[in-house]
Image: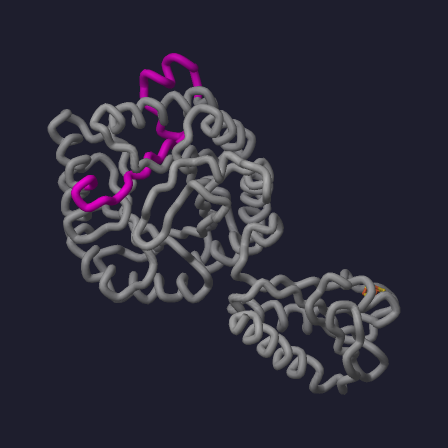
Amino acid sequence: MSEMTHRSKTRPVRVGNLTIGGSDELFIQSMCTTKTHDVDATVEEILRLEEAGCQIVRVACPDERAAYSIGAIKARINIPLVVDIHFDYKLALIAIEQGADKIRINPGNIGRQEKVEAVVKAAKEKGIPIRIGVNAGSLEKHILKKYGYPTADGMVESALHHIKILEDLDFHDIIVSLKASDVNLAVEAYTKAAAAFDYPLHLGITESGTLFAGSIKSAAGLGTLLSAGIGNTLRVSLSADPVQEIKVARELLKVFGLSSNAATLISCPTCGRIEIDLITIANEVEEYISTIKAPLKVAVLGCAVNGPGEAREADIGIAGARGEGLLFMKGKTVRKVPEETMVDELKMEIDKLAEEYFEK
Ligand code: SF4
């Protein structure tokens, strides 16, 4: 995207070794499903998420055991760690002391001013940001009273209320989310928030559901926002293994040309001209390229009639032919390959292209 978007106009905020905001770069986030105090299980899950392409990870921090585990977790992972705290300022202080790269806490819920000041002071000293997480399901009483029910305006007002508390303490390393499980409400809230302030936005459609339905719901909501140039980080929330959240998020970013580190599969819907077992091959190739960190386009086509021509933009691909496959690059057939080895040959060529990409 070349035009200036809200995304690129946001204030840059450091989270660990990443800068969120101020550019068109978007980061993929997920949240651990493990008990945070179970350090081994949490680290194991985070490493799986890293491998899948997760760039920032959040853990829940419901008690002191969790808070005191942050340092041990951080020592064994490679991506920034966000600690999610509700209300309890003591947990926030412990998490910050333990080395959290960002904390998620709503300052308006912390309580007495001294407590808010203590958290802000600690975050400032460590140079870490605070994410304000507005959720349609838990808006402040005074806002609900004013609007009657959760509205986008109410959500933005809630965000501004928390932002003001931090700004009054001269704290500006702020990231904001305005989650709702209702897609239209979330889209409206984020759109209004983007017009109201320039802090980076963390996108999410909360409680979106299972892998299949939740992916569609998230894609509809997050896709609308991404295409409008809104959003600096995102999480796809699914009732599934969080690795699936990363896969869906990566796919979504690829759709909008917002991912520079992932390969894309182009595969035909198949029809009566099909010459190979395309669905099996497409799934195998998709799995294979899921860990390729180069922006390659790989095509798998059922036949050669429209094959290579239909996928001219692909860097590499195979098209089925009777008993064999055609390996093609940039719309031109390179060579014929026997059916039994064509997927292996394709994988080898993909690896070569990925290597060349990183050598450039
Ligand atoms: Fe049909 Fe061939 Fe097109 Fe696939 S590539 S949809 S098999 S014509």
Up the image or down, 19 lies above or below 120; here it is below
- The picture quadrant for ligand 1 comes to bottom right
Please tell me in which quadrant of the rendered image residue 352 appears.
Answer: bottom right
- The residue at the point 38 percent across, 21 percent down is 157
Up the image or down, 165 lies above or below 175; here it is above
Q: Residue 233's spot in the image, x, y percent?
A: 44, 45
- The residue at the point 85 percent across, 81 percent down is 322
Q: Residue 146's spot in the image, x, y percent?
A: 39, 12
Q: Is residue 137 magenta?
A: yes
Residue lying at the far left in this picture: please name it. 114
Please tell me in which quadrant of the rendered image residue 37 appears.
Answer: bottom left
* Of residues 345 and 13, the one drawn nearer to the viewer in this rendering: 13
Q: Residue 16's spot in the image, x, y percent?
A: 30, 52
Please tell me in which quadrant of the rendered image residue 159 appears.
Answer: top left
Q: Is residue 47 magenta?
A: no
Is 196 placed left or right of 287 in the picture?
Answer: left
Query: Looking at the rendering, in which quadrant would you find the C terminus?
Result: bottom right
* Of residues 136 and 168, the one drawn nearer to the viewer in this rendering: 168
Query: Looking at the rendering, in which quadrant would you find the N terminus?
Result: top right
Is 138 placed left or right of 259 in the picture?
Answer: left
Is 301 placed left or right of 241 in the picture?
Answer: right
Q: Is residue 224 visible?
A: no
Is 68 placed left or right of 27 in the picture?
Answer: left
- The residue at the point 23 percent across, 44 percent down is 127
- The region drawn magenta spans 123-149
- The residue at the point 37 percent across, 53 percent down is 56
Up the image or down, 122 lies above or below 109; here it is below
Up the image or down, 300 lies above or below 95; here it is below
